[in-house]
């Protein structure tokens, strides 16, 4: 605050904090495109709307909660277990995963992840109701 004694006034932090990606405008720089929220019973992915899915009730693993992931982020390894891998991606209109990648259900979202590194290659938001 300018009027506070002893305040030196510092420029905004330009380096990322350890373990966090650089941010621009409040979101990681590796985010791709514009976020389109679900509209009713449809979700937006790669320029098209698809029907949302009524999935089984979601239960977060102990100590985890929702965080919006972006392309380039790293999904925690707990979500790479078989309980989270989703094999009916074709029924949703999603592209088949390349070799070594899997579609993972992460709460209401579907995340395409490299199984070896956990790096996120694609995200479809608000797929599940």
Image: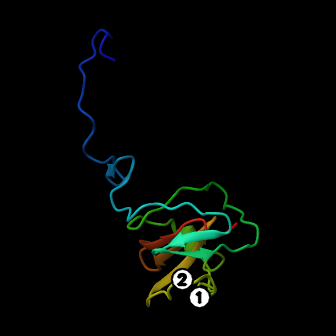
Labels 1 and 2 touching (C-beta < 8 A):
yes
Q: Is residue 109 left or right of residue 53?
A: left
How far, Cα to Cα, is label 1 from label 2?
Answer: 5 Å
- What percent of the width, then of the height, locates residue 28? 37, 55
Mark 1: give few (<14), some (14-19) or many (20+) Cα within 10 Å: few
Mark 2: give few (<14), some (14-19) or many (20+) Cα within 10 Å: some
Residue nearest the viewer, comparing 7 with 123: 123
- What percent of the width, then of the height, locates residue 117? 41, 75
Judge whether 3 appears above or below 47 on screen. Answer: above
Task: State the residue position of label 1.
Answer: 90
Look at 47% across and 76% down and name the residue there. 113
Judge whether 107 appears above or below 8 on screen. Answer: below
Judge whether 128 appears above or below 63 on screen. Answer: below
Q: For numbered disc 1, what is the local secondary structure?
A: helix
Q: For numbered disc 2, what is the local secondary structure?
A: loop
In the current view of this chain or complex, which residue is farthest to the right?
57
Look at 68% across and 68% down and name the residue there. 41
Residue 106 quadrant:
bottom right
Residue 83 quadrant:
bottom right
**In the rendered view of the protein, which quadrant contains the C terminus?**
bottom right
Task: State the residue position of label 2.
Answer: 94
Residue nearest the viewer, comparing 22 with 34: 34
Look at 49% across and 76% down and name the residue there. 112
Q: Is residue 52 left or right of residue 4?
A: right
Residue nearest the viewer, comparing 91 with 11: 91
- What percent of the width, then of the height, locates residue 17? 33, 46
**In the rendered view of the protein, which quadrant contains the N terminus?**
top left
């Amino acid at each position: 605050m300018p009027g506070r004694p002893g305040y030196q006034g510092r420029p905004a932090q330009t380096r990322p904090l350890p373990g966090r990606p650089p941010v621009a405008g409040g979101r990681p720089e590796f985010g791709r495109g514009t976020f389109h929220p679900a509209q009713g019973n449809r979700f937006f992915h790669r320029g098209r709307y698809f029907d949302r899915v009524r999935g089984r009730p979601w239960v977060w693993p102990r100590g985890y909660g929702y965080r919006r992931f972006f392309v380039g982020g790293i999904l925690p390894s707990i979500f790479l277990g078989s309980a989270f891998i989703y094999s009916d991606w074709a029924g949703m209109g999603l592209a088949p995963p390349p070799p070594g990648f899997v579609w993972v259900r992460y709460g209401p979202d579907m995340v395409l992840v490299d199984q070896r590194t956990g790096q996120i290659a694609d995200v479809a938001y608000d797929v599940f109701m």
